[in-house]
């Protein structure tokens, strides 16, 4: 039992929210607004901590989920008048960098991968495979634009044009968000919105991050050597802890490894 002695100042503390994995809707082991919302609410509870730190290791994922999570962070920080710091581990790329931009300051290791401010859509085409086996694809729609980019049919120029328009519009939203959150910190030396990635020092030079530093050191420098760090993160449910539902877990793992592999990780 911990006793609180009146008038004795307590040690300052900082809440650390671990945000690791691919960003996707309804993520089982990755990141999504639904699973992170109760964690963030606890971390930002007024009067509990001096600041909230985001420990990020994400190759990106869903633009919408990235936006929802970031908006929640910014709203909670404003409501509770609490500063937010982001610390990048291996990578904060694409949606992962979107999350980092929700913080007032971003720190990374010299070897951290930062950037990939772009939008991607990838898939496969199986039309020749099903032709080989004599399989006929049948699709009936009401509305000429209802069927789009069917992987079992040859790509249509109008579908590609439509997809590129959507990707372009999403890219513009991403660019606007980064410009609004990073502001005058961004340099005009290089075009940082091409989807390129950089390591820590170059990212700092471009204004994508504020400094090179690690969580423990930066927090102790900013809030004092006696500052306590309290970790907040996603907990595995009962089935996950005992290795149940292995097929689904394996699928999530492979998807996540493929996303990290794009950055050599």
Image: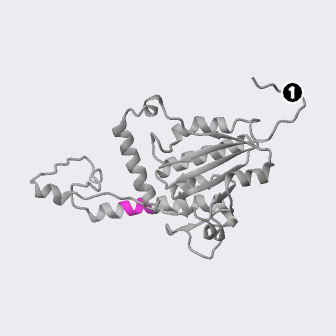
Q: Position of residue 131 (x, y in %)?
A: 12, 57
Label 1 residue SS = loop
Q: Position of residue 241 (x, y in %)?
A: 46, 33
**Counting other residues with Cα less than 10 Å from the Cα at mark 1, is it few (<14), some (14-19), or many (20 or more)?**
few
Q: How is the image coloured?
A: one colour
Task: Check if residue 83 falls in the magenta segment.
Answer: no
For residue 146, side relative to residue 86 (left or right): left
Q: Position of residue 160 (x, y in %)?
A: 32, 63
Which stretch appears magenta? 163-168
For residue 82, side relative to residue 94 (left or right): right
Q: Residue 149 is drawn in which quadrant?
A: bottom left
Q: Looking at the image, which residue sits at the far right?
A: 7
Residue drawn at x 64%, y 36% as measured from the top left:
41
Residue drawn at x 28%, y 58% as measured from the top left:
124
- Tag 1 residue: 5
- Given residues 41 and 140, the one toward you in this image is 41
Residue drawn at x 62%, y 43% as measured from the top left:
17
Q: Looking at the image, which residue sits at the far bottom?
A: 189
Residue drawn at x 55%, y 45% as measured from the top left:
68
- Given residues 82 and 55, the one toward you in this image is 55
Q: Residue 180 is drawn in which quadrant?
A: bottom right
């Amino acid at each position: 039992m911990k006793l609180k002695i009146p008038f004795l100042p307590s040690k300052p503390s900082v809440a650390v929210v671990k945000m690791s994995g691919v960003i996707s809707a309804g993520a089982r082991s990755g990141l999504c607004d639904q699973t992170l919302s109760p964690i963030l609410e606890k971390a930002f509870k007024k009067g509990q901590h001096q600041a909230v730190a985001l420990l990020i290791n994400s190759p990106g994922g869903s633009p919408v989920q990235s936006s929802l999570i970031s908006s929640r962070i910014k709203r909670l920080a404003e409501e509770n008048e609490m500063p937010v710091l982001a610390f990048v581990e291996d990578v904060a790329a694409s949606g992962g960098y979107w999350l980092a931009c929700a913080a007032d300051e971003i720190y990374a290791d010299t070897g951290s991968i930062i950037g990939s401010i772009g939008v991607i859509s990838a898939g496969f085409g199986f039309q020749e495979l099903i032709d080989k086996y004599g399989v006929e694809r049948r699709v009936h729609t009401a509305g000429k634009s209802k069927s789009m980019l069917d992987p079992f049919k040859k790509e249509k120029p109008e579908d590609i044009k439509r997809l590129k328009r959507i990707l372009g519009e999403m890219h513009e939203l991403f660019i606007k968000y980064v410009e609004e959150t990073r502001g005058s910190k961004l340099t005009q030396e290089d075009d940082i919105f091409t989807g390129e990635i950089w390591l820590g020092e170059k990212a700092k030079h471009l204004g994508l991050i504020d400094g090179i530093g690690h969580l423990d050191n930066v927090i102790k420098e900013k809030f004092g050597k006696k500052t306590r760090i309290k970790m907040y993160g996603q907990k595995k449910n009962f089935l996950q802890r005992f290795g149940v539902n292995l097929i689904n877990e394996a699928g999530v793992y492979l998807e996540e490894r493929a996303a990290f592999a794009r950055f050599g990780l």
